[in-house]
Image (cartoon, grey):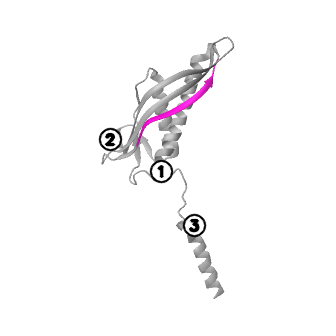
Amino acid sequence: MKRLAAATLLLAAALLPLQCGYRLSGRGRNLPPGAAAIAIPGFTNQTLRPQAGQFVTFAVRDEFVRRSRLRLVAAQGDADLLLEGTITSFTVTPISYSDQGAANQYQVRLTLNVRLVEIQSGALVFQGSGLSFRETYETDNADFFSQETGSLAKIAEKFASSIVSTILENF
């Protein structure tokens, strides 16, 4: 009798965590259940910074591969989902000046529109308009452009992390 009670208690304890409603994050459960592959073509770049589209596209692709169960494919015909993006604004604004009057700190701001579509049904899975991301960096006059590129890489990574989290977890 004690063995039966102990076995029943052990079984109940083992099944309890399955019913609590908690789950691991980052599993992409808000994606359509049959989706296995995603196509992420180059983001459309409406800015005067040609490298902005490349940095953002590569960062988003890397983040999806790293964080989701989806396989990245090149052709839309091989994909279940399509992630499209448009970079609408890229601005660099000086926010601090040295004693000599030269700008030594800048803020980079990137604004984007993103949408995720289920290809077969055409259903909109996610849409974000006017998403804005900022990065601040310091520079000296001799190395302005290389630091701006580094800042663009950082802001692209921040955007990618944020948008992939939003899509996968529906925050």
- The first of marks 2 and 1 along the sequence is 1
Please tell me how crowded label 3 is: few (under 14), some (14-19), or many (20+) other residues with Cα within 10 Å.
Answer: few
The residue that appears at 54% across and 52% down in the rendered structure is 25
Vertical comparison of 134 with 102: above or below: below
Give, as a three-letter code, the residue at label 2.
Gly
Q: Which part of the image, by quadrant, shows the N terminus?
A: bottom right
Give the SS element for disc 2.
Answer: helix
Query: Looking at the image, is mark 2 or mark 1 nearer the viewer?
Result: 1
Disc marking residue 18: none
Vertical comparison of 137 with 103: above or below: below
Give, as a three-letter code, the residue at label 1.
Gly
Q: Which residue is mark 1?
A: 28
Disc marking residue 17: 3
Give, as a three-letter code, the residue at label 3.
Pro
Image location (x, y in percent) of residue 12: 58, 75
Corner quadrant of residue 77: top left
Please provide the residue range marked out in magenta.
127-139
Please tell me how crowded label 1 is: few (under 14), some (14-19), or many (20+) other residues with Cα within 10 Å.
Answer: many
Q: Which residue is mark 2?
A: 77
Q: Residue furthest bottom?
A: 1
The residue that appears at 35% across and 43% down in the rendered structure is 78
